[in-house]
Image (cartoon, rainbow, N blue to C red):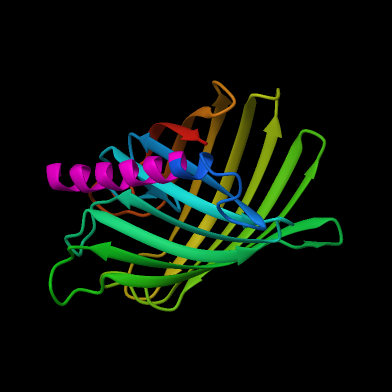
Amino acid sequence: MLRTLTTAAAAATALLAFAGSASAQDAPFPGGSVSFALGAATDNRSKDASKSNGEPYVWGQAEWENGSGLFYAATGFETIKSSTGSELELEIGAGFTPEVAGFDLDLNATFKQQMDANPGTDDDAWEFTADVKRSIGPASGRLRLQHSPDGTGSTEAWTWYEARIGWDFTSKLEATASIGRREQDNSVDYTGWNAGFTYALTDNLEAELRYHATDADVPGEQYADALVAGISIAF
C-alpha cells in the first residue's frame, strides 16, 4: 500500500505541477481550457461496489475542454485493491456533450489500465458511457448506460443501467440518490443504490457524504453496505 500511495502522490504532484505551468501561460491550449481535480475518500465506490476493498483511496484527474464545450478529453488515476493484484489504475478517455431537445447528452469512451498487475491477469478494459441529463429549477435527473466488452480480472462483458435524481437545496448543498443494475458475464449480477449530500466548502473545495448498498450476497467488503465520506478540490 505504501508503494501505491507513493506512486499516487507522484501522479498528484505531476498534476499540480502541470496545473501551475498551465496557469502561468496565457493560452497553453488554444481553443480550449484545462481543469484539474484531486480527491480522497474513505472507500473507492464504483457502481456502488468497492474497488478498494473498503479501504481509503486517492484520485486525480486532468481534463481538457474545447472552446465550445462540446468536446473534452481527460486522464486520471485512482488507487484500488484489485483481484489482479494491482493497487493503481490509470485511465484516459474522450467524449462529447451535445444538447438534443432540451436534454444534455454525454457520450464518452475510456480506456483503463491497472498497473503492476499479476502476470497473466486481464489488467485493462474499455468502458463506453452514455448519459442523458435534464435540470428544471433545483431538480435534476440523469439516466446512464455503461458497457464494457471485456472487464478487468475474470469479469468479461458487463452492462450498467442507472437512474439518478437530485435536488439543490442551496447554491452549496445538493442531495442526490440513484439506483442501478449491473449484469456481468463470469461475475456477480446485482442491484445497487446510493444516496447522499455534497457541500461546497469553498468555490474549489467540496465535501461529500454518501451511503452505498447492494443486494449482492457475497462475503467481504466489495459489495457490503458502507457510509463513505470524501473531499475533493478543483482548479
Depicted 66 relative to depicted 232: above or below: below
Depicted 53 relative to depicted 113: above or below: above
* Residue at image coords 12%, 73%: 119
Q: Is residue 201 visible?
A: yes
* Residue at image coords 32%, 41%: 13
Say if the magenta span includes residue 19.
yes
Q: Which residue lies furthest to the right in this view?
A: 101
* Residue at image coords 13%, 68%: 118
Q: Nearer the viewer, residue 177 or 7?
A: 7
Q: What type of secondary structure mainly makes up the magenta span?
A: helix
Which of the 4 quarters of the picture holds residue 91? bottom left
Depicted 161 relative to depicted 230: above or below: below
Which of the 4 quarters of the picture holds residue 92? bottom left
Quarter of the image for the N terminus: give it. Answer: top left
Say if the magenta span includes residue 171.
no
Q: Position of residue 154 (x, y in %)?
A: 26, 73
Q: Nearer the viewer, residue 85 or 141?
A: 85
Q: Position of residue 169 (x, y in %)?
A: 70, 24
Query: Which range of residues does the magenta coloring cover?
Result: 1-20
Left or right of 206 on screen, residue 78: left
Q: Where is residue 193 in the image (x, y as percent from the top left)?
A: 51, 46
Number of disc labels = 0
* Residue at image coords 53%, 33%: 196
Left or right of 162 on screen, residue 191: left
Q: Nearer the viewer, residue 235 or 116?
A: 235
Q: Can residue 194 be seen in this view?
A: no
